[in-house]
Image (spheres, rainbow, N blue to C red):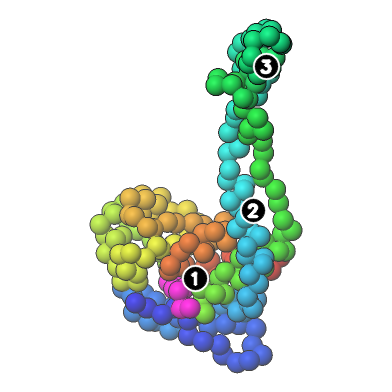
Amino acid sequence: MPVGRAGREGKGDLMSVLNRYSLDGKVLGTVEAPSAIFDVPAHDGAVFEAVCMIQANRRRGTASTKNRSAVRGGGRKPWRQKGTGRARHGTRSSPLWVGGGRAFGPTPRDYRYSMPRKKQHLALSTALSEKAKAGKIIVVDEWTAERAATKEMRKRLDNFVGRTDFCLVLLKEKNRNVLLSMRNIPRAATKVGRNVSVWDVLRADVIIMEQACLSQLEEVLTS
C-alpha cells in the first residue's frame, strides 16, 4: 500500500511534503502542503468537541412520547377514595397504570449547537495532520472518470487501498462520473475538499485527494 507522506523539508519550514501518485499507484514525486494544516500538534480536545457537535447536529430530535395529559381517558376517578381496600388513584392516565402517560419521556427538540470556527478548523487540521503523519494521505493530480463505470473505479482504488479499508476521495469540484462510479462501492465515499469535516477524516482509513484540494483546504482552514 502506498505511503502518502514523504517527511518534512526542514525544522523551520512552513511547508510539509507529501508524496504525489499517478492513478496507477506509482510515485511521481512530492508536493508541498501547508504545515499549518498537515503538521499540527495533536489537539484531542478540539477533535472530541467537533465530533460531538457533528453527531448532535445530525440528530433528528423527533422522539416523542405522551405524558399523562396527552393520553386518552382518565377523566374520572377509577374508584372511591376509601373503603375498597385498594390503593388511592385519581386517574387512569397516571404513569403508574398500563396505558397511562410516560413520566419524563422525550419530546421533540433541536439538538443542534455550534462551536467557534477557529476551534473547528483546529480540529480538522489535527485530524488531517494525524493522517498525514501515519502516511494515510495520498495526493494525485486529478481523480476523474471519462464515463460512469464502477468496475473500473474499483480497480483504480485497489492500487491504493485494500478491500477492507474505508477510502475517502476529495475532489476539487463535483464530478458526476466519479460520483456515479463510486456510489455503489462499499466503504468508499467522495467529498468536495472544502466541505470535508472532522468526522469524514476520522472515519477514513485512507484519504485520496486531488492536488488542487490542498489550496482549497489552506484557504478554508487558514482564513
- Mark 1 belongs to which amino acid? Gln
**Could you say whether the residue bearing mark 3 is in a helix, strand or loop?**
loop
Dot 3 and dot 2 residues touching (CB under 8 Å): no
- Mark 3 belongs to which amino acid? His
Q: Nearer the viewer, residue 154 or 206?
A: 206
Segment colored magenta: 134-140
- Label 1: which residue? 211
Residue at screen point 66% across, 60% down: 49
- Label 3: which residue? 89
List x then y, in percent, for residue 22.
Answer: 36, 75
Mark 2 neighbour density, 10 Å: few (under 14) some (14–19) many (20 or more): some
Q: Which mark is residue 53?
A: 2
List x then y, in percent, for residue 174.
Answer: 47, 53
Residue at screen point 35% across, 71% down: 160
Q: Nearer the viewer, residue 90 or 54?
A: 90
- Which quadrant of the structure image shows residue 97? top right
Q: Earlier in the sequence, mark 3 or mark 2?
A: 2
**Could you say whether the residue bearing mark 2 is in a helix, strand or loop?**
helix
